[in-house]
Amino acid sequence: LILCLKPSSLPSDEPSLQPSSMPSDEPSRSPSDEPSVEPSGLPSDTPTNNPSSEPSVSPTNNPTASVKPSATPTGAPTMDPASTSAPTKSPVSSPVSASCKDSTLKFYFPKDGNPLAKRKSCKWVGKKASKIIARCEKFSVNAHCPITCGTCSLCVDSTMQFIVQKGVIKDCAWVGKNGKHINSRCNKATIKDNCRKACDNCS
């Protein structure tokens, strides 16, 4: 009995009855018509040209580790990303002191050297957003209207004259002029809001 030590130069017309004990060095040019009975031990370097028409009934017990990264990233993110703390919906605004309020008293807005030129209110100051800054920077409007002007941190008295009641015009200097009357004058909420420093109403 003579054993052939070299493979034949031409393939046989019919397959051998038993598979060879050693795998071939190179893969076959055409895939087999039927799948192998057992899966290969290592994953293939390239995917199959034609994937299976139906998905597997159940996942594999031991999935193979990825040998190479995918050429292109996935189109959608993972369903369960790493848990992160939820961001705050909006920044926390600084608390406003309860003593900081716009004065409800009308004040006189000086013009052309006349201190009683125009009678205005804090509502007028904030009526047009484009003019709020310019109005708050004039005279002591920011002390009269600290909420509108965003100046609650300033503990100052308004220097403008305001109307205490019909026909009575006063200012914060009058409020603190006589120590005996400061408390009674500051007990009026409207004056307390307008003369925060004189009435010690800045906390």
Image (cartoon, helix red, strand yellow):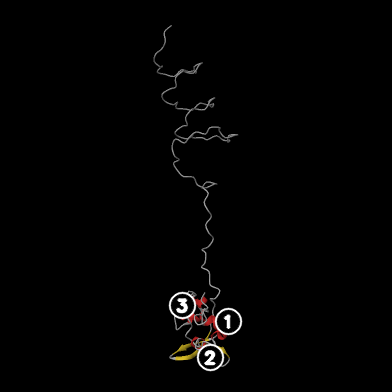
Q: Earlier in the sequence, mark 2 or mark 3?
A: 3
The residue where tag 1 is placed is 189
Residue occupying the far top of the picture: 1
The residue carrying mark 2 is 169
- Above or below residue 52? Residue 81 is below
Question: Rounded to the nearest whole Å, what is the CA distance between mark 2 and mark 1?
Answer: 16 Å
Q: CA–CA distance between discs 2 and 3?
A: 26 Å
The disc at residue 133 is: 3
| Between marks 2 and 3 in the image, the one whose residue lies nearer the viewer | 2
Q: Position of residue 46 (x, y in %)?
A: 45, 34
Secondary structure beneath disc 2?
Answer: strand
The N terminus lies in quadrant: top left
Name the residue located 56 percent from the left edge and 86 percent from the top edge. 185
Q: Position of residue 110 (x, y in %)?
A: 46, 88
Q: Amino acid at mark 3?
A: Ile
Q: Amino acid at mark 2?
A: Ile
Do tag 3 and tag 1 residues touch (Cβ < 8 Å)?
Answer: no
Of badges 2 and 1, nearer the viewer stands 1
Instruction: Please state which of residues 82 and 35 is positioned toward the viewer in this rendering.
Output: 82
Residue 156 position in % (x across, y down) = 47, 80
Q: Sequence-wise, which precedes: disc 3 or disc 1?
A: 3
**Mark 3 to mark 1 CA distance (whole Å):** 26 Å
